[in-house]
Image (spheres, rainbow, N blue to C red):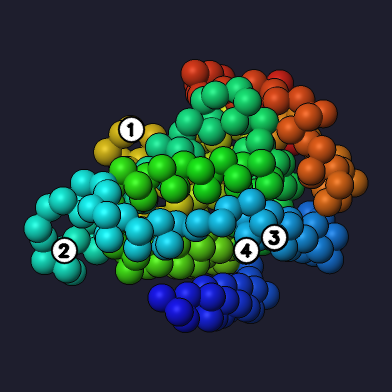
Amino acid sequence: MGNEDVIRLSFFFGVLIFMAIWELLRPRRVLTMSKLTRWSSNLGIVVLDNALVRFLFPVLAISLALTGQQNNWGLLNNIQLPFVFSVGLGVLALDLVIYLQHVIFHTVPVFWRMHMMHHADLDFDVTTGLRFHPLETIMSMLIKLAAVAAIGPSATAVLIFEVTLNATSMFNHSNVKMPFNADRGLRLLVVTPDMHRVHHSVTIRETNSNFGFNFPWWDRLFGTYRAQPAAGHEEMAIGLSQFRDAKKNSLLWMLALPFTGDPGYYAINRRGGEPVSRNR
């Protein structure tokens, strides 16, 4: 895995540039904020998140997977399976963990405070898929490490999962227009922008749906799937009802949000409710 960083960076910049160009050529929605303001803040968060992970975690997921293989940690390291099948099962299991983590972050109040920075973005484009509070990133890394130790996926499975998750997160947060039939077919295999955009609706019952980041099957299996937003993709309001001030999307304000922001009424047990205020 000596080329891990090269692989990660190549996919990251490749997908980011590709989706940014697609957004320019075929946008789905008219953006409401200055792209310079949003991109500088959202990409600034990415730099900070990665620096903190490198500083705080001497062992990352792939290294832990290699150690697990050597010491027979985890379920898959104690079952004899063909390599390809084992890799596929490992990727699938890790994706299920991410789905469940996402649901938990919408359920537990302290986790929601971390996660709401992601939802407070007033626009929805490729950089929204990279906008996660450092505290959420740290918690996500702890959950991922625990999952790798328990499941025992190979290092190859972990690398495929992490690269794919990062790429699909940028893809399904992108402001791109796809033909309806193409979207309908593609969302049987992967979470599409139209599918995930529903999750970023200001309407509570829509925010608490479509939790998948990579594979779309978990939402259908667990009853959290919603096909389309009630107001339509062009008219739906993006974000959270309690955060409508564009000036508060600066990097410093985003970092302070879990400690100073109003969590609103977005707890998952109120999924049938409506926001206090709506901006349509």
Q: Residue at x 51, y 63 (%)?
A: 166
Query: From this viewpoint, which residue is outermost toward the right?
Result: 247
Instruction: Return the x and y of residue 15 as percentages of the image width and height.
Output: 55, 75
Pointer 4: residues within 10 angstroms few (<14), some, or many (20+)?
Answer: many
Q: Say what amino acid the circle numbered 1 marks.
A: Gly
Could you give the CA–CA distance between mark 2 and mark 1, rounded to whole angstroms? 27 Å
Q: Secondary structure at mark 2?
A: helix
Q: Which label lies toward us, 2 or 1? A: 2
Pick whichever, 8 or 201, lies toward us. Answer: 8
**Mark found first going from the N terminus, 2 or 1:** 2
**Mark found first going from the N terminus, 3 or 2:** 3
Mark carried by residue 132: none
Could you give the CA–CA distance between mark 3 and mark 2, rounded to whole angstroms? 34 Å
The residue indicated by pointer 3 is 51
**Mark found first going from the N terminus, 4 or 3:** 3
Res 186 visible: no
Q: Residue at x 67, y 30 (%)?
A: 113
Res 241 visible: yes
